[in-house]
C-alpha cells in the first residue's frame, strides 16, 4: 500500500516525517515536549522547519472527517486548531499496517487547562475557563456545529492581549448542520456538564482544586453561562440609523453579564444595519491597560471599559477596521474625548477629572436615551450634563476618586476652550440626514 499524504498548500515538508514508524516510537530528535491534554489517541508534537505540529494517530475516515470539520470551522471564523494534513496508507518497512494520522498546527501560546494553574485552580481562573468555554460553545452553535464531546480536555486556552479565549482542539465527534435544534444544543451542554464534572473532580483528587470550589456546582455553571449568553446574542438585532442607544444597550447588557465585546460587525441592509456582537472573556485589568496603551489615560477598570466601548463604536461608525485602532484612538481623543472634556467650565477644571467627566457624560447620555427613547448625540448629552448636573453640583461633590482619570501623559491631553461644538460635524453621529454618516459602515473583521 502506498503512503497517501494530503497536505494543505505549502505543507510538503510533512512528507519527510518518519511515517513508517509508529508515532509512539518516533525518534526524540523530531519530538517537541509541550504540555498536552488527556486524549484517547496518541498525540505528539513535532518540529518541522521551524514550525511545531501536533500529530494524532487515528483511523483514516475519522482523520478525514476531523480535517474537513476543522477546515470548515476555521473558514467560519471559529477559534480552533488549524488542520495541516492527513496521512494514510502507512506501513512499517516489514509491511505491517500503521494507523492514519491527522496533523494540525500547534496552537502557539495555548495551554491545556491543567497547565493553566501551577499549583491550585482558583475560583477566578475557574470562572474564566468556564466563561471562555461558554463563549466557544455559543459561537460553535451559532455556526451550526454540534460538538458532541465538549470538555476541557478538548479545548485549548490562550491568553492574548488580555483576552482569555477557548479554542476547539478535538472536532472528531462534531457535525455541521444548517441550524441546530434545541435538542442538539442541549445534548452538547449535557456532555459539557458531565465531562467538566469529571475533570473538576480529577483536579480535586489531585489536591489542586481551591477548597472554595465545588466541582459539581462549577461544572453546572457552564450551562448557566451558556444560556445567558445564548439568550443575549443568538438573535441578530436590526438597528436602524438613529438607534445607537439600542447598540449601547446591547453592549451594556453583555458587560453586565460579565462578558466583553470582541467584535462588533455591522451588515448594512434595507431598513437599518444588522449588528452582530461577538462576546469574549478578558483578564483582570485588561481594559485599563488597553486604554492606557491607546490613549495614555489611566483610569479604573469599569470606566476604561465604557470609554473603550465608546471608542470601538466610534471606530465602527467611521467604517475602520480593528487593525486601525491606534489611528482611531488618536482621532477619538482629539475629536471626541477632548471636545467633550473641554466643555467643563474653567472654574471646575482641576476638580473633575477629565476621564471621569467623560465617563459621567456617557452615563448621562445613556439615561437620557432611556428616558427620551431615542438616540442622544454625544454633544447634546455633554451640554445637558454640564448644564443640569455639573453646574448644580456642589464643587466638593465633583471631586471624585483620586486615581480616576488621571492622564499619565498630560501633553497628549490638552483641555482647551472648545466650548461650542457640534460633534455631528465631526462625523460622530448616526443621523441619516448627515452626509458624513457612512451609509455602509463596512463589515468589520468578519
Ligand atoms: N494543534 C494542537 N495544538 C496544541 N495542542 C494540541 C493540538 N492538537 C492536539 N493537542 C493536544 O493534544 C491533546 C489531545 O488531542 P485530541 O485531539 O483531543 O485527541 P483525542 O481525539 O485523542 O482526544 C489536546 O488536549 C491538546 O492538549
Ligand atoms: Mg480529545
Image (cartoon, rainbow, N blue to C red):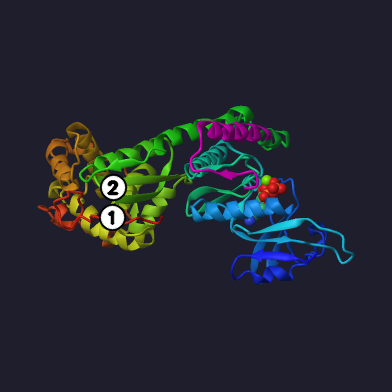
In terms of depth relative to the viewer, which is nearer, 257 or 191?
Answer: 191
Residue at the spot 20% in from the left edge and 55% down from the top edge: 437
Residue at the spot 45% in from the left edge and 36% down from the top edge: 230
Label 1 sits on a secondary structure element that is: loop
Circle 1 Cα neighbour tier, 10 Å, few/some/many (<14 / 14–19 / ≥20): some
Say left or right for 267 vs 423.
right
Q: Name the residue under label 2.
A: 273
Q: Where is residue 112 drawn, in percent x and y? A: 64, 48
187 is within the stretch colored magenta: yes
Counting residues from the start of the chain, the first of labels 1 and 2 encountered is 2
Q: What stretch of residues is rendered in magenta?
A: 171-198
Residue 378 marker: none
In terms of depth relative to the viewer, which is nearer, 349 or 275?
Answer: 275
Vertical side of 148 occupied by 211: above or below: above
Query: In this view, which residue lies farthest toward the front?
Result: 1
Q: Where is residue 374 drawn, in percent x and y? A: 19, 38
Disc 1 C-beta below 8 A from ligand 1: no
Badge 1 vs badge 2, beta-carbon distance below 8 Å:
yes
Query: In this view, which residue lies farthest toward the right?
Result: 94
Say left or right for 30 vs 166.
right
Circle 2 Cα neighbour tier, 10 Å, few/some/many (<14 / 14–19 / ≥20): some
Quarter that holds the N terminus? bottom right
Q: Magenta-highlighted stretch: main secondary structure?
A: helix
Tally the marks.
2
**Residue 406, can we see it?**
no
Quarter that holds the C terminus? bottom left
Q: Where is residue 368 drawn, in percent x and y? A: 19, 36
Q: Name the residue under label 1.
A: 441
**Residue 386, can we see it?**
yes
**Quarter of the image where one finds residue 19:** bottom right
Q: Where is residue 115 drawn, in percent x and y? A: 65, 48
Amino acid at each position: 500500500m502506498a503512503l497517501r499524504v494530503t497536505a494543505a498548500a505549502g505543507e510538503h515538508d510533512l512528507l519527510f516525517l518518519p511515517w513508517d514508524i509508529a508515532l509512539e516510537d518516533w525518534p526524540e530528535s523530531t519530538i517537541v515536549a509541550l504540555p498536552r491534554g488527556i486524549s484517547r489517541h496518541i498525540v505528539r508534537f513535532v518540529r518541522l522547519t521551524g514550525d511545531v505540529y501536533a500529530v494524532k494517530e487515528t483511523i483514516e475516515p475519522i482523520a478525514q472527517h476531523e480535517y474537513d470539520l476543522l477546515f470548515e470551522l476555521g473558514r467560519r471564523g471559529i477559534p480552533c486548531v488549524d488542520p495541516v494534513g492527513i496521512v494514510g496508507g502507512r506501513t512499517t518497512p516489514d509491511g505491517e499496517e500503521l494507523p492514519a494520522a491527522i496533523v494540525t498546527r500547534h496552537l502557539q501560546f495555548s495551554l491545556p487547562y491543567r497547565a493553566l494553574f501551577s499549583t491550585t485552580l482558583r475560583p477566578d481562573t475557574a470562572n474564566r475557563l468556564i466563561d471562555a468555554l461558554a463563549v466557544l460553545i455559543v459561537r460553535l452553535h451559532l455556526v451550526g456545529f454540534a460538538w458532541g464531546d465538549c470538555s476541557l480536555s478538548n479545548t485549548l486556552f490562550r491568553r492574548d492581549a488580555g483576552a482569555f479565549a477557548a479554542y476547539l482542539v478535538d472536532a472528531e465527534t462534531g457535525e455541521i448542520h444548517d441550524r441546530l435544534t434545541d435538542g442538539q444544543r442541549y445534548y452538547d451542554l449535557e456532555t459539557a456538564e458531565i465531562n467538566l464534572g469529571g475533570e473538576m473532580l480529577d483536579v480535586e483528587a489531585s489536591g489542586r482544586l481551591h477548597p472554595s470550589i465545588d466541582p459539581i456546582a462549577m461544572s453546572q455553571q457552564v450551562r448557566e453561562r451558556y444560556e445567558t449568553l445564548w439568550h443575549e446574542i443568538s438573535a441578530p438585532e436590526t438597528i436602524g440609523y438613529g438607534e445607537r442607544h439600542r447598540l449601547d444597550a446591547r453592549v451594556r447588557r453583555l458587560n453586565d453579564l460579565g462578558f466583553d465585546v470582541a467584535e462588533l460587525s455591522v451588515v448594512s441592509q434595507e431598513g437599518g444595519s444588522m449588528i452582530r456582537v461577538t462576546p469574549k472573556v478578558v483578564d483582570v485589568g485588561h481594559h485599563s491597560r488597553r486604554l492606557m496603551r491607546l490613549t495614555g489615560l489611566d483610569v479604573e477598570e469599569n470606566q476604561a471599559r465604557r470609554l473603550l466601548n465608546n471608542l470601538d463604536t466610534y471606530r465602527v461608525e467611521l467604517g475602520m477596521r480593528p487593525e486601525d485602532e491606534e489611528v482611531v484612538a488618536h482621532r477619538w481623543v482629539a475629536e471626541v474625548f477632548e471636545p467633550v472634556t473641554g466643555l467643563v467650565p474653567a472654574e471646575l477644571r482641576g476638580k473633575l477629572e477629565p476621564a471621569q467627566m467623560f465617563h459621567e457624560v456617557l452615563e448621562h447620555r445613556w439615561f437620557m436615551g432611556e428616558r427620551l427613547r431615542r438616540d442622544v448625540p454625544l454633544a447634546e448629552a455633554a451640554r445637558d450634563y454640564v448644564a443640569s448636573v455639573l453646574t448644580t453640583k456642589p464643587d466638593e461633590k465633583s471631586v471624585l476618586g483620586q486615581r480616576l482619570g488621571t492622564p499619565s501623559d498630560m501633553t497628549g491631553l490638552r483641555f482647551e476652550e472648545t466650548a461650542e461644538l457640534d460633534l455631528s460635524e465631526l462625523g460622530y453621529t448616526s443621523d441619516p440626514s448627515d452626509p458624513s454618516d457612512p451609509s455602509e459602515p463596512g463589515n468589520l473583521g468578519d
